[in-house]
Image: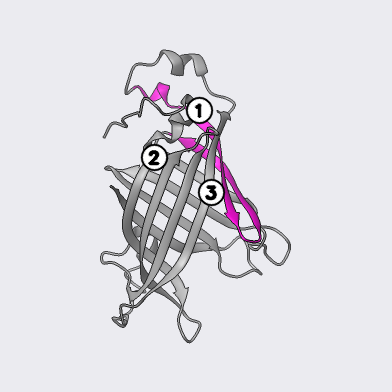
Amino acid sequence: MPIVLDPSLPRSLYPLAWLVGSWSGDGAAQVPDENQETIGRRIEQTLVCSPADDGTLSWVMSTDLVDAPAPLPPTSAFVDAEKAAPVADGSGERSLLVREKGSWRVGDPLPGQDLEAAENAKPGDPAGVLSYAVEFVLQREDGEEVWAGEVRGPRIQLGLRTSPTARTADGSIAATRMFGLVGGRLMWLWERAGDVASPEALSPYLSVELDRG
């Protein structure tokens, strides 16, 4: 599905044009139950990404936790048919899981790419797709949280760089986010270390599939 550019969008945000808009949908979150055992539960999310006057792309996201099983079929990040076990239906009660406000900023093309070939490529030619540095900054009550990574076409990969709270036992930070536009749907996954003693052992925390509008 081709990405339609808004003519009012700043050129600096062209690599994130596919993210612009209002989105809503559902997915799954891995959260502790009353026995502190991790279980998959349903989440519902709304997201608005809009150009800001300073050349960044604003991000306003709200995710509710629903006391119900994760959607079936579950989001692919959580699929493990051999280990799947029956889950209680739940009460259906809703509570706020996470709310975020922040901004995206696109940097320069990453080194090692043929910029001239990309400039001269015809529409649809893979040579015209470049990878750009991207920074994602969230404003939290206790300080800024900074993610950094790469955007290439309708795909983003991020790693957590600085955070006021998400530090592990040795002072390092372990979390990743991945975003993609697939068939017109925005899908994204947030992984983080479940054990501060093992920051390299990332596991899915939140995964959603969103529709525009």
Question: Does the magenta portion include 141?
Answer: yes
C-alpha gap between disc 1 and disc 3: 17 Å
Question: In this view of the protein, which residue sits in the foreground, 66 or 56?
Answer: 56
Q: Secondary structure at mark 1?
A: helix
Q: Answer above or below: position of 96 versus 113.
A: below
Name the residue type under label 2. Answer: Val
Query: What residue is disc 3 on?
Result: 102
Name the residue type under label 3. Answer: Gly
x and y percentages locating residue 64 in the rendered image: 39, 67
C-alpha gap between disc 2 and disc 1: 13 Å
Dominant SS type (magenta): strand
Q: Answer above or below: position of 13 versus 163.
A: above
Q: Answer above or below: position of 110 versus 43.
A: above
Residue range (magenta):
125-152
Count of all numbered marks drawn on residues in the image: 3
Q: Which mark is residue 12?
A: 1
x and y percentages locating residue 92 in the rendered image: 30, 77
Within 10 angstroms of label 3, few (less than 14), some, or many (20 or more) residues? some
Q: Which mark is residue 20?
A: 2
Q: Secondary structure at mark 3?
A: strand
Furthest residue toward bottom: 35
Question: In this view of the protein, which residue sits in the foreground, 194 or 100?
Answer: 100
x and y percentages locating residue 136 in the rendered image: 55, 45
Within 10 angstroms of label 2, few (less than 14), some, or many (20 or more) residues? many
- Quarter of the image with the N terminus is top left
C-alpha gap between disc 2 and disc 3: 14 Å
Is 136 situated left or right of 6 in this image? right
Within 10 angstroms of label 1, few (less than 14), some, or many (20 or more) residues? some
